[in-house]
Image (cartoon, helix red, strand yellow):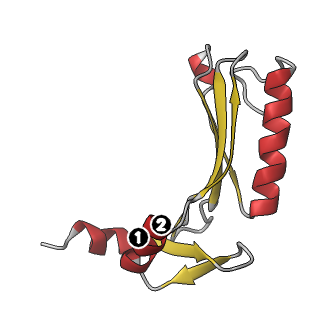
């Protein structure tokens, strides 16, 4: 029986960030796991007490080996009063993820981010 790590490697690609915060593909789960333990993958966290929400943008570093790759950066809204407002949004670069983070925060501050999402 194959180990869980080996089966994950069959369907996933693993990435770490270089000194410019650009994703670099690594050989496998072990190298990715070590990097994630030694580095903080969270780039921005905004707590919006009035809205009762937290917006977090982080490096995920795992992409499916599928025809369409999974975004490596994720911005997550958590703690929304409306459970439909707790959503995740992907981005392919740190710059795009941070811009998305700011748009989401501004929409939450204006009360515009409903369960329908960022659109």
Cβ atoms at labels 1 and 2 below 8 Å apart: yes
Answer with the quarter of the image where residue 86 lies: top right
Q: Is residue 119 visible?
A: no
Question: Which dot marks residue 36?
Answer: 2
Vertical placement of 26 versus 38: above or below? below
Q: Residue at x 73, y 30 (%)?
A: 117
Closer to the camera, 20 or 29? 20
* Outermost residue to the bottom: 27
Q: Residue at x 62, y 53 (%)?
A: 58
Tell me where residue 105 appears, x and y as whole percent.
79, 33
Answer with the quarter of the image where residue 115 lies: top right
Q: Residue at x 45, y 86 (%)?
A: 27
Q: Residue at x 75, y 77 (%)?
A: 20
Closer to the camera, 97 or 51? 51
Q: Which quadrant of the rendered structure holds the C terminus?
A: top right
Cα–Cα gap, marks 1 and 2: 5 Å
Q: Callout 1: 10 Å neighbours few (<14), some, many (20+)? A: some
How many numbered markers are drawn?
Answer: 2
Q: Is residue 58 visible?
A: yes
Tell me where residue 71 appears, x and y as whole percent.
64, 59
Answer with the quarter of the image where residue 28 lies: bottom left
Residue tagged 1: 33
């Amino acid at each position: 029986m194959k180990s869980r790590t080996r089966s994950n490697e069959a369907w996933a690609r693993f990435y770490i960030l270089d000194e410019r915060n650009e994703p670099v593909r690594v050989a496998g789960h072990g190298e990715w796991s070590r990097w994630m333990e030694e580095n903080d993958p969270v780039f921005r966290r905004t707590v919006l007490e009035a809205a009762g929400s937290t917006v977090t943008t982080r490096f995920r570093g795992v992409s499916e080996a599928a025809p369409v790759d999974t975004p490596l950066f994720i911005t997550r809204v958590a703690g929304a009063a409306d459970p439909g407002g707790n959503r995740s949004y992907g981005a392919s670069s740190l710059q795009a993820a941070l811009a998305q983070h700011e748009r989401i925060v501004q929409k939450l501050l204006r009360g515009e981010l409903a369960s329908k999402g960022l659109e």
